[in-house]
Image: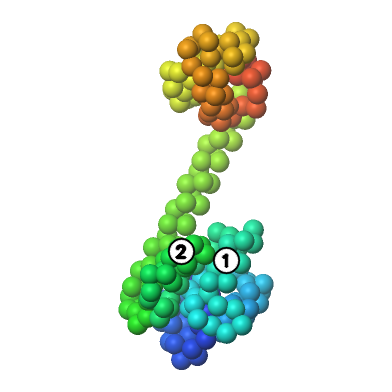
Amino acid sequence: MSRRLLIVDDEPNLLMAIAAVLRGEGFEVMTARNGKEAFLQIAKSMPDLIVSDIKMPLMDGFTLARQLRSAPHTELVPIVFLTAKDEIEDRIEGFQSGVDVYLTKPFEPLELLAVINGILNRVERTRTAITTLVGVESVSDSEPNSNYYSESLTEAEQRVAKAVARGLSNKEIAVELELSVRTIENHISRILSKLGLSNRVEIARYILKK
């Protein structure tokens, strides 16, 4: 499946040139002349990445980026600024508005391609890693594998888990292990997360089964 890009620039010749380069590399390309047109295109089809100029009529790139980052359905879409504005203040505002990469004109098409491919490949690796992690965590929701999970708990977490199984409160565990209550709370939170459990009772059951 080809990756979908949205290119936003008010210079028609440059817009066409960028689109042609990217289409030549196998991307599906949508175009817009300003931020408002960009949102119309996004409403039709969600892009995998957006390349935008800053200085544009009706809605500039800074406003576009901020609005994209504030909307739940677009907050994670990668944004690349491609602009003639090269002052440090512009770069700072760009990153503060949420862009991932700031490139300046004139630019090298190969550099733009490298940036786009780098971002999209990273996004794909992240998605794959998350999918794999979720799959591992859901293998056995009802009864965790004791060998796997006992190895994943640290020595301190195992001591806390055993104390929970003995029915001690967080304050009592903190006194016994000479730790703060906040540290005990953090340990219990990590234990629940690692074991895929929901509460202290399930921690106790898990320890008693071992």
The residue identified by callout 1 is 66
Amino acid found under the numbered disc labelled 2: Phe
Residue beneath the point at 61% across and 82% down:
58
Q: Mark 2 Cα within 10 Å, few/some/many (few <14, many 20+)?
A: some
Q: Mark 1 Cα within 10 Å, few/some/many (few <14, many 20+)?
A: some
Residue 120, placed above or below residue 153: below
Instruction: Give the mark count.
Output: 2
The residue identified by callout 2 is 95
In the rendered image, which quarter is residue 69 located in?
A: bottom right
Residue beneath the point at 59% across and 36% down:
138
The answer to whether one can see residue 41 in this image is no
**Whole-percent x and y of residue 28?**
51, 75
Under circle 1, the secondary element is helix
The answer to whether one can see residue 190 in this image is yes
Q: Is residue 23 left or right of residue 45?
A: left
Residue 63, placed above or below residue 195: below
Residue beneath the point at 57% across and 72% down:
63
Under circle 2, the secondary element is helix
**Whole-percent x and y of residue 34?**
57, 81
Q: Nearer the viewer, residue 67 or 165?
A: 67
The answer to whether marks 1 and 2 mark residues whose Cβ atoms lie closer than 8 Å is no
Q: Nearer the viewer, residue 91 or 116?
A: 91
Residue beneath the point at 59% across and 16% down:
170
**Whole-percent x and y of residue 11?**
49, 89
Marks 1 and 2, the one that precedes in the sequence: 1
Residues at marks 1 and 2, CA–CA distance in whole angstroms: 10 Å
Q: Is residue 152 left or right of residue 46?
A: left
Q: Nearer the viewer, residue 177 or 196?
A: 177
Residue 31, placed above or below residue 165: below
**Whole-percent x and y of residue 209?**
58, 13
Residue 205, placed above or below residue 82: above
Amino acid found under the numbered disc labelled 1: Arg
